[in-house]
Image (cartoon, rainbow, N blue to C red):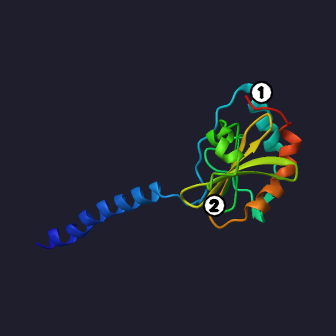
Amino acid sequence: MNFFRHRHPVLLGLPAVALLITIAGCSSADDNASVSVPSPNAKVTKLCQNLDKVLPRKVDGLSREDPEPRSALTAGWGSPAIILRCGVERPPKMIDPKVALGNDPKAAGGNVNGVDWLMETQDDGSTRLTTANRSAYVQVTVPKGSDNSGVLVDLASSIKKAIPKGIAN
């Protein structure tokens, strides 16, 4: 009888240890965001690689913490992360006449420090900003409650330096 009494906790302990290891293996210790990496053509990829080299270490006071998977086409700052993706497709709202006329409550255009932007409010309250009139589309997603203008001011000089004016393919 004592044999079973001593063995029983050991049998229960092994599955518990296995479960603990499984849970620990599935959880993430770092809070890096995850994003889909764009797949632009070679010309745009080169522009995006150049942008990655000149991006600021801090945006809106937040340190750079790149999302997973690591790529020269993506960057991030802070947590919740401000996410930059370079080489994205042109957003449909960019050619929507309602936006150009100022008749879309969820989208508007503007210029910050010499960079034209399309600003779209997302359903979750975040803001998606996409460069316009540049040779590559650069998309920046700013979490709900963050200051869009500070982000755009901090990114403007890097974008002007790496992504020339023009029409993206």
The image quarter in which residue 44 lies: top right
What kind of element bears circle 2?
A: loop
- Examine the rendering and report whether any part of residue 60 can be seen: yes
- The tally of labels here is 2
Q: Position of residue 43 (x, y in %)?
A: 77, 27
Q: Position of residue 87 (x, y in %)?
A: 70, 36
- Examine the rendering and report whether any part of residue 120 can be seen: no
Would you say 27 lies left or right of 148 here?
left
Q: Position of residue 84 (x, y in %)?
A: 70, 49
Q: Residue under label 2, please give it.
A: 143
What separation in Å lies between label 1 and label 2 (alpha carbons)? Answer: 30 Å
Would you say 101 lies left or right of 164 here?
left
Residue at the spot x=40%, y=56% of the render? 22
Residue at the spot x=78%, y=52% of the render? 110
Q: Compared to 78, does 156 lie above or below?
A: above
- If the image is split into quadrants, where does the N terminus sit? bottom left
Labels 1 and 2: the sequence-earlier one: 1
Q: Amino acid at mark 1?
A: Lys
Q: Position of residue 145 (x, y in %)?
A: 65, 67
For label 2, the crowd category at 10 Å Cα-Cα, with few meaning under 14, some 14 to 19 and many 20 or more, is some
Residue at the spot x=78%, y=43% of the render? 52
